[in-house]
Each structure stands twice: as structure tokens, then as C-alpha cells.
């Protein structure tokens, strides 16, 4: 089978691309980074360092690359059996046009073999959002072809992949944690579901999407924001601060109560899942900086993301939420001149004040009790 993967960054190479290659597929990476693209074309392999109790280096083979800004990527889409992405939510719309052109090329060649597209992004139902963007570029006739032959499969992904280690000179080297989870919606495939070890199928994807979002993503971000306030540089340093660990645990327990109520998760099993994630944050072999994890606070304060979505769940079910409220308040203390979203958030905060700014990005009511509590929490954190 042929696979095309958009995004040859650390997550693309260290997680999804590796799983596809390990499954025996010929993998082509599509990216605009010419250094990485050229290195993949020349070497056709790259090393992945997997760090945990034992550290091992595995070489991913049978790979190549194409510049995603060229027409060559359209040819690759037309010939692929599976297309995956790890590009970030903002880039999905950009690549949607190339995917649409690739589908048109398949139709022109009368290629009716099923192709499945999976956006392995840190977002809720990212593939469905990608599908909507692709359909905008297609005629009614091509939309009908797409509905019949192209599967758009939503997924949930979980693996901590930090930036390259200091002093690393190989542009293809990547370090990942031992743990990984890639769960896909088995109801959305066209044709046979490909056999990819490490890709798990479910008919209840949202339970796993929200479990990851409300636990790993929520906990990771709170660890980062409280770590910034405490003067820590890394997630490991932050989570090893007893006060922060207690606060992060309490926050994940609040978001976890929503999951238990909504999906019927076993409380003991979920408590064990929280402890496993806390252990992942403390992995001594991963240098993950709090500034990296804290970036893009506006996206993370949006209604469908890791702070406000679980908070809304507590409001829906009448559950405690003081720690989630504090986490939202901590986001307003995150300042990073190199992050446009952090700059924008602070600028609006300075002009409009806390309540109006939070309401604008979160879609919470500026006059609501929870927004007032968040402002009080912000002042208490000063």
C-alpha cells in the first residue's frame, strides 16, 4: 500500500509516519521544509529515539518525500491508498485544495479504488473539518465521487513528541516517548480497514477524543501555565513541584468527572489513567519546555478545546470546577512575545479587561458566575 503523510515534522516522523512504515507501507512525506524533504529523498530512512525506562533507536525505512507546495503532491494523492496529516489545525485548510485536486485526478483516471484520509491532529474531529474544506473545492459531480470512494476518518492521537534535543545536527532525528495511542472511527472507512499495528478502531470515537483532550491535553497545559508562574522551564520540573502536581491532578479529576458522567468510564480505571499521564509528564528523558506547551492560548481557550470544553461539561452536569476555573485564569498570565496568540490575548486583555476577553474567546457569558470566578482566580494568582 502507498501512504502519503502531510507534515514531516517531529510528530509526522516520530509517530504516524513510523506506524505506517512499520505496517509495511511505502510512505511519502509532504512538507515545505526543503532541508527535511531533500534529506528524506536522499536517505530514504531516518532514526527515531524512543525514550522510557530503556532508550532504543529504531530506523524507519522505505520512505521518501515531496514538496507539498508543488504539483507533485497532487500526483501522490492520486496514487495513494491512505493519506494522513500531522500539520496543525491552521494548515489543514491550506492542504485541502491539493487533496481536492488529487481526488479530481483519481476520478479523471477512473481510479475507483477506495482511499482513506485521516487527520491525526490535536483537535476534535479534525478529519471532518478537513473534509468540509476539501468539498468546498469540488463540483457536485466530484462531491458525489468523493462520497462514494473517499473515506474521511476521524481519529484521536496521543504521543508526546518534544522538539529536537539540544545539539542535535541531524534534521531527521526525532525523539518520542514510549507511549502512543492512535484511535480511529471504524465507521468512516471506505473499503477494508488497513491493518496498521498501533492504530486502534472504535465505533465510539468521541469518548476517546474527549478522554485524551480532557486528561492529557488539559493536564499538560495546566502543568505548563502553573510552571511558568512558578518559574520552571520544563514540564518535568513543573510536575515534580508538589503544589503544581496536586493542582494538575485535581484539575484532571474535575474534567474526569465529566467523562465518567458522560461516557460511563470506570472511575478506578480513569484514576489509573490520570496517574499514568502524570508519570509521562515526569519522563526524565523528555525535555519538553513549558513555553512550547503553553503556546496558542487563544486556541486553547476556545469552546471546543482543553480548558473551556471540560468546564462546560461541569456546568452541564452540576459538577465541581474550581480547579478548571483556576486553569483558565492561569492562561491569562501566559506571556510570550514569540507567540502571536499570546501577544493578541494580552493586547485585548489590556484594552477590554478580563471578563470581556475571556467571553470573546471562550463564548462564555461575560456576566456569568463562572467568568466572575475566573477573574477572581486570576487576581489571586498574581
Image (tube, grey):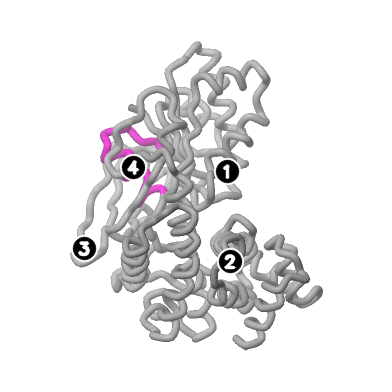
Label 2 CA crowd tier, 10 Å (few <14, some 14–19, many 20+): few
Image quadrant containing the C terminus: bottom right
Looking at the rendered image, the disc whose residue lies closer to the viewer, 2 or 3, is 2
First in sequence: mark 2 vs mark 1: 1
Looking at the rendered image, the disc whose residue lies closer to the viewer, 4 or 1, is 4
List the residue tagged with mark 4.
Answer: 200
List the residue tagged with mark 2.
Answer: 318
List the residue tagged with mark 3.
Answer: 55
Q: Is residue 43 visible?
A: no
Q: Secondary structure at mark 3?
A: strand
List the residue tagged with mark 1.
Answer: 92
- Residue 118 percent coordinates (x, y): 46, 38
First in sequence: mark 4 vs mark 2: 4
Image quadrant containing the N terminus: top left
Q: Viewer-proximal residue, 41 or 286? A: 286
First in sequence: mark 3 vs mark 4: 3
Taking the magenta stretch, the answer to whether it contains residue 259 is: no
Label 1 CA crowd tier, 10 Å (few <14, some 14–19, many 20+): many
Q: Viewer-proximal residue, 59 or 351? A: 351
Amino acid at each position: 500500500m502507498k501512504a502519503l503523510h502531510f507534515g514531516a515534522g517531529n510528530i509526522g516522523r516520530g509517530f504516524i509516519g513510523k506506524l505506517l512504515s512499520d505496517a509495511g507501507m511505502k510512505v511519502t512525506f509532504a512538507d515545505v521544509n526543503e532541508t527535511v524533504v531533500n534529506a528524506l529523498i536522499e536517505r530514504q530512512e531516518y532514526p527515531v529515539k524512543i525514550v522510557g525506562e530503556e532508550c532504543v533507536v529504531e530506523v524507519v525505512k522505505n520512505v521518501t518525500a515531496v514538496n507539498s507546495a508543488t504539483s507533485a503532491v497532487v500526483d501522490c494523492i492520486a496514487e495513494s491508498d491512505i493519506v494522513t496529516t500531522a500539520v496543525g489545525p491552521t494548515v489543514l485548510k491550506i492542504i485541502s485544495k491539493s487533496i481536492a485536486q488529487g481526488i479530481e485526478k483519481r476520478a479523471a483516471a477512473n481510479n475507483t479504488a477506495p482511499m482513506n484520509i485521516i487527520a491525526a491532529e490535536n483537535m476534535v474531529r479534525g478529519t471532518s473539518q478537513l473534509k468540509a474544506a476539501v468539498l468546498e473545492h469540488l463540483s457536485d459531480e466530484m462531491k458525489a465521487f468523493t462520497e462514494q470512494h473517499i473515506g474521511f476518518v476521524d481519529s484521536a492521537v496521543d504521543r508526546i513528541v518534544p522538539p529536537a534535543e539540544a545539539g542535535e545536527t541531524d534534521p531527521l532525528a526525532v525523539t518520542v516517548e514510549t507511549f502512543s495511542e492512535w484511535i480511529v472511527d471504524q465507521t468512516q472507512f471506505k473499503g477494508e480497514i488497513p491493518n496498521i499495528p498501533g492504530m486502534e478502531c472504535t465505533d465510539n470515537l468521541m469518548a476517546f477524543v474527549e478522554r485524551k483532550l480532557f486528561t492529557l491535553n488539559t493536564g499538560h497545559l495546566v502543568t505548563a501555565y502553573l510552571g511558568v508562574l512558578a518559574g520552571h522551564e520544563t514540564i518535568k520540573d513543573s510536575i515534580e513541584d508538589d503544589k503544581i502536581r496536586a493542582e494538575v491532578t485535581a484539575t484532571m479529576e474535575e474534567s474526569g468527572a465529566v467523562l465518567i458522567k458522560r461516557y460511563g468510564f470506570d472511575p478506578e480505571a480513569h484514576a489509573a489513567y490520570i496517574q499514568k499521564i502524570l508519570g509521562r509528564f515526569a519522563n526524565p528523558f523528555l525535555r519538553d519546555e513549558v513555553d512550547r506547551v503553553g503556546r496558542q492560548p487563544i486556541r486553547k481557550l476556545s469552546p471546543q478545546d482543553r480548558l473551556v470544553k471540560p468546564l462546560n461539561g461541569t456546568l452541564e452536569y452540576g459538577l465541581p470546577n474550581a480547579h478548571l476555573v483556576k486553569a483558565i485564569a492561569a492562561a491569562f498570565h501566559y506571556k510570550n512575545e514569540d507567540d502571536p496568540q499570546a501577544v493578541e490575548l494580552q493586547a485585548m486583555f489590556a484594552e477590554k479587561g478580563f471578563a470581556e476577553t475571556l467571553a470573546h474567546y471562550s463564548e462564555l457569558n461575560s456576566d456569568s458566575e463562572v467568568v466572575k470566578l475566573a477573574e477572581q482566580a486570576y487576581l489571586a494568582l498574581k
